[in-house]
DNA sequence: GTATGAGTACTGTACCGTCCAGTTCCAAAG
DNA sequence: CTTTGGAACTGGACGGTACAGTACTCATAC
């Protein structure tokens, strides 16, 4: 059932995602998108009423995809033995997922336009950010219930975990455009973050 | 020596800072700035060759001002007695300084335009961000030398401290435009962050 | 009385969104 | 398999608007 219309729709979405992530909202023209999607501008406007609508759609779609990734990661084995090791591995996967160029670009895109699209910023914050934290918090709560961690406020703990891990690389990436983090650096951040977290919450 | 020219120069800088912080780079027109500064557009162009130059100047000037604020904060008494209390107070002041609307707006402004002005983003990162962290790290190192803290990598510790404190409120502010943090929330973040930090680094 | 600035008109460019005339796809009917 | 009708698409032109930067004339400060 991949009608021609559906194919075009998909091509436009894909092209728009690419260009928006790369050049920002203001830096992207509808002609750019149409050209990259190999589609006439008229067709773009047939599928998406205007630029704002198209932008909102691609942001939410990309957020959705990120959501499911986070959900997959947060499943942590609850055996006592290698707790620090497991947590470090989780931290490392978190770092990889959230410092991926696409994710960083999405963050930048939303922050940059949070004043023009306040609803979009809020929606991303709730769906793409707090939801991920809630998932992580649930995992920590499970560990706490098993007596492996000592936690009052699981959501706060999840925030601390994220902050310890992500503050450095995310800021670097936000400000210096394309930041290249070596694998070794990420390993180091993950180990150090997990260690501090356990020191406080075990 | 406040010549007329110098006064105009100052008025333009002030107006540009206000408008840029408020409406972003693309959202600000040179006419807006001229009007707010009560100055003709011609005069703006006499003092600043073009829009980009003006933007860079106001960003760096604002960064400079933030720098000195951080320097003032990071002075921590090194008496053993009330270490946790002192650290909590430092945390609280940090939070106040770095969640101030002006600072948040500056962050947004730089992140939003880091692709168009990569040098500016890098410069802010080094001057306004890493420099503040270095100051904080020096303070921690001093505490470590006195045997009050156990620290391998003072810069990493400073990053952890910042991440624990700022991850929540800064992200909320970045994404949801104008975030209003109550005093009570900030108190809570400061106390919790300082507690976790000490658990790991004392 | 001269340099500096105000006020304003103007040029050139970029881009959103629309319109239209001609073409291609696709599915159903013969 | 061929025809046919309508929907979707192309390509390009166009109106309208916003804005960076310049030019020019008249007023004002010092």
Image (tube, coloured by chain):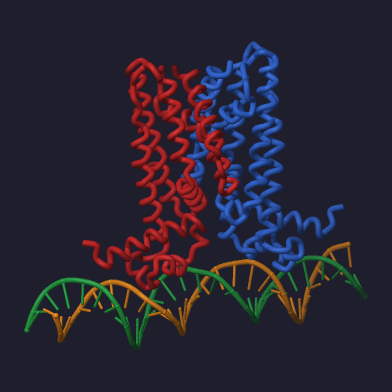
Chain colours: A red, B blue, C green, D orange
- Could you tell me how many numbered marks the image carries? 0
- Judging depth in this view, the residue of A104 and B88 nearest the camera is A104
Q: Where does the image place residue A139, in percent across and percent down from the top left? A: 35, 27
Residue A194 against residue C24 in the figure, above or below: above
Q: In x, y percent, where is residue B58?
A: 69, 52
Residue B69 horizontal side relative to residue A56, left or right: right
* B172 or C14: nearer the viewer: C14
Using the image as rendered, state which of residue A202 and residue B71 is in the foreground: A202
Seen in the picture, residue B30 relative to B62 is either above or below; the reply is below
Residue occupying image coordinates x 37% and y 63%:
A12
Q: Is residue A125 above or below residue A163?
A: below
**Residue at 32% in and 66% down:** A8
Locate the C terminus of chain B and report the quarter of the image it occupies.
top right
Choose top left, top right, bottom left or bottom right for residue A1: bottom left
Camera sees residue B186:
no
Horizontal and vertical percent for residue B192? 50, 23
């Amino acid at each position: 059932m991949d009608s021609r219309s559906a194919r075009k729709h998909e091509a436009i979405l894909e092209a728009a995602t690419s260009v928006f992530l790369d050049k920002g909202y203001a830096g992207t023209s509808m002609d750019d998108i149409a050209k990259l999607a190999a589609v006439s501008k008229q067709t773009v406007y047939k599928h998406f009423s205007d630029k704002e609508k198209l932008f909102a759609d691609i942001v939410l779609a990309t957020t959705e995809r990120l959501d499911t990734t986070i959900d997959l990661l947060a499943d942590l084995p609850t055996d006592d033995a290698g707790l620090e090791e497991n947590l470090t591995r989780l931290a490392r996967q978190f770092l990889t997922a959230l410092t991926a160029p696409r994710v960083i670009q999405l963050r930048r895109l939303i922050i940059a336009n949070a004043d023009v699209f306040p609803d979009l910023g809020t929606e991303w914050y709730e769906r793409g950010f707090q939801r991920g934290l809630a998932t992580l918090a649930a995992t920590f709560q499970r560990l706490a219930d098993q007596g492996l961690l000592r936690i009052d406020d699981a959501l706060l703990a999840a925030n601390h975990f994220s902050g310890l891990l992500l503050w450095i690389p995310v800021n670097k990436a936000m400000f210096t455009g394309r930041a290249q983090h070596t694998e070794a650096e990420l390993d180091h951040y993950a180990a150090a973050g997990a260690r501090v977290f356990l020191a406080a919450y075990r």
